[in-house]
Image: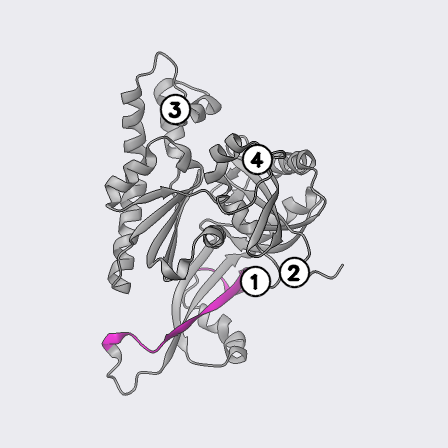
Amino acid sequence: MFLSEKTPLLAIDIGSNSIKLAQLIGSKNKLELNAFGVMPLEPEAVEDGIVKDEEQVVDALTRLVKAEKVDTRYAVSSVAGEAVIIKKIKVPMMTDEELSESISHEAEQYIPFDIDDVQIDYQVLEGVAGGDELHDFEEDEEEKQEIILVAVQNEIIDSRSEVLRAAGLKPVVMDLDVFATVNALSISRNLEEMGSVAIIDLGGSFTHVSILMDGVSSFTRDIPIGGNTLTEKLQSQYELEYRDSESMKLGLLPESVAKDEVVELIVTSFEPILDEIQKSFEFFSTTSNSQVEQAFLCGGGAIIPGLDGLMSDRLGLPVEIFDPMESIKVNSRKFDAHSLARMAPIATVAVGLARRRFDYL
């Protein structure tokens, strides 16, 4: 089959705690939700972005695809974690053909892996050229252009692809979680008119931070701490099973548990994450001369009651829990509006992936 813009794609987001499936139909600006589902995973099936228990993940994905009765097998998925390197770098001005031929050589100095063990991609940041302002008056300063450089270890791409194939799917696009969240936000927002905004994806093992400046990705970071820290503290403090501690995170407290105690655990668990986010914002401010004006919160951590307020107070800016489906048509006869609203924050990566086509990001 010849793959084109009209080829239906199935988005698969394999996270630390669950697998999310989504499919959008319609044109670029008139999207409709055609399929959405979530399948929980057992603890340690996926750790730090790497599939550890392939049999369990394949089984869960197979059951999810069957339950949603989707009619396509072409899948788009994504990766994240320490095996993913994203850097904004400057390279000499050159043609697209010259850059394509030299990118591996340019990338070697920025990648802590053997260049033969990674897949490399890049995107030129349009309208950005020239050296740092401090060096503009040096006569020997070579004219530069900025690019977003991405390198992903082959091992993690192969692992995800093998899981998809084992579940009867055909992987055709492999994206990054941080780019998928940006793609989801762009459905309902004009990013070019928003100034400097951050997307904070609070996952189980990682917190993904992406900062956009006038719609351009200017900073990305994967912080290796996530909501599982709180889960583990709840398990230890109250001698709970994994699923029971996950329920407590959502505010479902046993009568014997004091709310103030849980709130205190939430604050102490997310303090290290908030410290790292703050450091990221400060680094961005120093290197760009721009302040983050607003943050959008998504991922599993976003459904913890009151976390948006905690983050807003700590970061000193408005924090909005993002609903990736707010501008997508949803058939009320096919989907339960209450359930979708409750799960919306964890659907962000999947929705962003589902927007992918073969002729636009």
Q: CA distance from mark 3 to mark 4?
A: 20 Å
Q: Residue at x 67, y 33 (%)?
A: 67
Tag 2: amino acid:
Glu
Asked if the residues shown at circle 4 and circle 1 are in contact, with their CB atoms under 8 angstroms apart, the answer is no
Instruction: Give the extent of the magenta segment.
Output: 112-134
* Residue 199: mark: none
Q: CA distance from mark 2 to mark 4?
A: 26 Å
Q: Position of residue 69 (x, y in %)?
A: 70, 38
* Residue 360: mark: 1
* Residue 5: mark: 2
* Residue 38: mark: 4
Asked if the residues shown at circle 2 and circle 3 are in contact, with their CB atoms under 8 angstroms apart, the answer is no
Q: Nearer the viewer, mark 4 or mark 1?
A: 1
Asked if the residues shown at circle 2 and circle 1 are in contact, with their CB atoms under 8 angstroms apart, the answer is yes
Q: Position of residue 65 (x, y in %)?
A: 67, 38
Q: CA distance from mark 4 to mark 1?
A: 26 Å
**Quadrant holding the N terminus:** bottom right
Q: Secondary structure at mark 1?
A: loop
> How many marks can you see?
4
- Res 217 seen here: no
Tag 3: amino acid:
Gly
Give the mark nearest the N terminus, 2 or 3: 2
- Res 197 seen here: yes
Q: Which residue lies under the disc numbered 3?
A: 251
Give the mark nearest the N terminus, 2 or 4: 2
Q: CA distance from mark 2 to mark 3?
A: 43 Å
Q: Does residue 16 appear left or right of residue 92 in this picture?
A: right
Q: CA distance from mark 3 to mark 1?
A: 40 Å
Q: Residue at x 52, y 31 (%)?
A: 339
